[in-house]
Image (cartoon, rainbow, N blue to C red):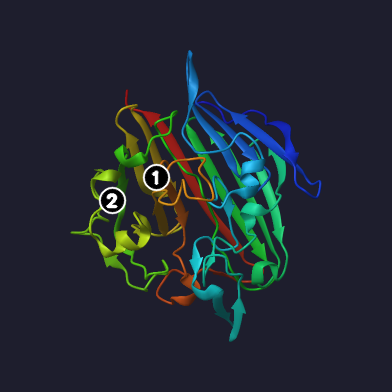
Amino acid sequence: MSPSATGVETNRFGNLADGSPVDLCTLRTEHLELTVTTFGGRILDLKMLSAGAPGASVVLGFESLAPYLRDRSYLGALIGRYANRIANGQFKLRGTTYQASKNEGANSLHGGARGFDQRIWSATPGADGLTLTYTSADGEEGYPGALRVVVTYALVDNELRLHYQARATSDTPVNLTNHLYFNLCGYPRPAVLDHVVTLYADQFTPVNESLIPTGELRDVAGTPFDFREPRAIGERIDANDPQLLIGQGYDHNWVLRNQGSTLRLAAEVCHPESGRRLEVLTTEPGLQFYTGNHLGGPSDRSFGRRCGLCLETQHFPDSPNHPNFPATILRAGEVYTSATTYRFSTTS
């Protein structure tokens, strides 16, 4: 096995309107090159390297800071304090109802109006990669307790490894993930409809009209949500299915098999024409598969509709309001941990 990334190259990426500096950090191995910014802990670029040829970029990202300040698609961002949606932005703890900020109609999405994707993270290069740290203040976006979050990005051989850790001063919901958009084509960026996907899940969580889970765990068998065997995304994405119509494509949480604290295979993606392949391993119980249905909208035409796919390892959406879902309340003084690995290869 090739060694981990050796050293981190750091450069200034720009400044926020208040003058706060934003840095750009680059890690490399023989097989991968990763570029990260301290604004939102966002992954700007991830290249698959090959001898004698330029690296093929396999994620969506911008080349400058300004577009990220306007971005509402969460490109490559660290997401928190609660990834995905919370109905009406409300949850109860110890008999008290808390109101998180609403930023998607009546609901809270990806941590609220100014979630972790809009914050400056402290970056510390180390032997294991790049460590990003952020402390969310008590009451930030309506969440109780101060929360200290530490995320490590590490490159090892052909893998990008993400490790999350958090501690809170008060009981609070925590659900962390990264919102990478993958496109294994490289450039240019056509729609990902020809990407072939396998999801290691027998159930998904159907949603209501505002994309909030109903609480049901529905079998994928006999539905367009059955990716237990490899299927092209475009094969059934526009089927006349009520759930696909609500999401305008795939934008749902899959219930992963073999839930527990160990890293296990959650998804595989292959681009047949290029032979590029991605495997996703995680300790999380759920996977939000999103097909970029709202990319290319009126507020941002930088990328075309469905030109990126997300595989967000996570706990289930709106879990604080569904006792039958895996718990997402981090108790004061306890340690939240989560790990996800993206493994890249080629078949040709």
Of all residues shown, which one is farthest toward the left?
A: 222
* The quarter of the displayed image where residue 213 is located: bottom left
- x, y (%) of residue 152? 61, 45
- Work out whether residue 188 or residue 133 is closer to the camera in this orientation and state it: 188
Q: Secondary structure at mark 2?
A: loop
The kind of residue tagged 1 is Arg
Q: Residue sitting at 52 percent across and 40 percent down?
A: 302
Of all residues shown, which one is farthest toward the right?
A: 19
- x, y (%) of residue 14? 74, 38
Q: Would you say residue 183 is visible in this rendering?
A: yes
Q: Secondary structure at mark 1?
A: loop
**Residue 284: image tag:** none
- Relative height, residue 336 to residue 40 (above, below): below
The kind of residue tagged 2 is Ile
Residue 348 relative to residue 224: left or right: right
- Work out whether residue 164 or residue 301 is closer to the camera in this orientation and state it: 301
Of all residues shown, which one is farthest toward the front?
A: 298
The residue at which mark 1 appears reads as 306
Mark 1 surroundings: few (<14), some (14-19) or many (≥20) residues within 10 A = many
Figure quadrant of the C terminus: top left
Q: Residue sitting at 63 percent across and 73 percent down?
A: 171
Q: Determine contact: label 2, label 1, CB under 8 Å.
A: yes
The answer to which of marks 2 and 1 sits earlier in the sequence is 2
- x, y (%) of residue 311? 42, 49
Residue 217 relative to residue 64: left or right: left
Residue 57 relative to residue 199: left or right: right
**Residue 237: image tag:** 2
- Work out whether residue 66 or residue 30 is closer to the camera in this orientation and state it: 66
